[in-house]
Amino acid sequence: MVIDQLIEQIRYKKNPCIVGIDPEWGKIPACYKAPNLPAHASILHWSLDVIDAVADIVPAIKPQMAFFEVYGAEGIRIHQKIIKYAHEKGLIVIDDSKRNDIGNTAKAYAYAHLAKEGPINADFLTISPFLGTDSIQPFIDTAIQDGKGVFVLVKTSNPSSVEISEAINPHGEKIVDWLALLVNMMGQKSMGEHGYSSVGAVVGATFPEKAKALREIMKHNFFLVPGYGAQGGKAKDIPPFFRSDGLGAIISSSRNVLYKHLEAENFYPSISAYKQLVKQQAQDMQKNVYQELKSAYSGMLY
């Protein structure tokens, strides 16, 4: 099961942090932009270099599909290539596409993104729950069939997420709490050897207090935690997302790792210098988060 592979990589690398692959053209260093080179070719070169820089540090990468779709068919091909390359490097891949629909359309999305025989073949996929339970099931079915996983949007990192997550449903429950109960229930049929389900939840790093309550509901579900770094999430906020074994969550950062050169003084725009900076940022994130977890949980398993 891929959830077990993820846990084993976290323990081996002593790192629950992952790096997003979000190619924003205006932020990518000029050293990747040759005048006669198409943008999509530059994006591919940059993406592979980011993977090379962090492959020995992180257990997983998280490519954000939207940043590849803007390049049309070539962008989709790049997305597929970097997933294949990441797998060759031994990394878990979380496809951050936030897909959902109903019936056969949901099945088609699930096949395209998660099936071993599908064109993308990611290990995990982020999905939206807001079309109801019958829209989630096809993704879970495909995930179970092919040993993959999903992360259901439960409490996203953006400030206005409260407009929906804190709303009350007809049964008097907050939507976020009802979703957490749903994720817990739907994940019970896909438990891995390490005691965690391959059905997880997206819970933003910007809501650490809410994470405490959600962790009580979703004891055996992994959290994908975006919002670390540029969006305001800090290492000191991280422990509530985890269980006392130091597992149960992966912390994702994109801008803070990929685009730190935009803030760095005296940055020389060479490929080697950029890769070194990316590596250093990934190492710093690992060190900061790991120290906070070790301080909070003396019984950590890694």
Image (tube, helix red, strand yellow):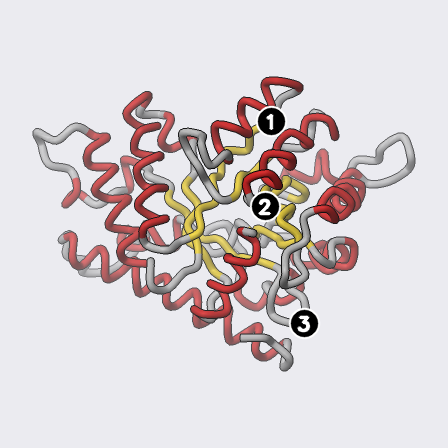
Give the SS element for disc 1: loop
Q: Which amino acid, mark 2?
A: Ser
Q: Earlier in the sequence, mark 1 or mark 3?
A: 1
Q: In this rendering, would 229 be left or right of 4? A: left
Q: Which residue occupies 62% across, 22% down?
A: 101
Give the foreground label among 3 and 2: 3
- Location of mark 1 (residue): 100
Q: Which amino acid, mark 3?
A: Ser
The residue lying toward the viewer, choosing from 146 and 167, is: 146
Give the foreground label among 2 and 1: 1
- Location of mark 2 (residue): 157
Give the residue at the far bottom of this rendering: 298
Q: Residues within 10 Å of mark 2 (few under 14, many from 20)?
A: many
Q: Which residue occupies 75% across, 46% down?
A: 180
Q: Earlier in the sequence, mark 3 or mark 2?
A: 2
Q: In this rendering, would 259 be left or right of 12? A: left
- Whole-number angstrom distance, CA of label 1 to CA of label 3: 33 Å
Q: Which residue occupies 33% across, 58% down?
A: 55
- Location of mark 3 (residue): 244
* 104 in relation to 134, above or below: above
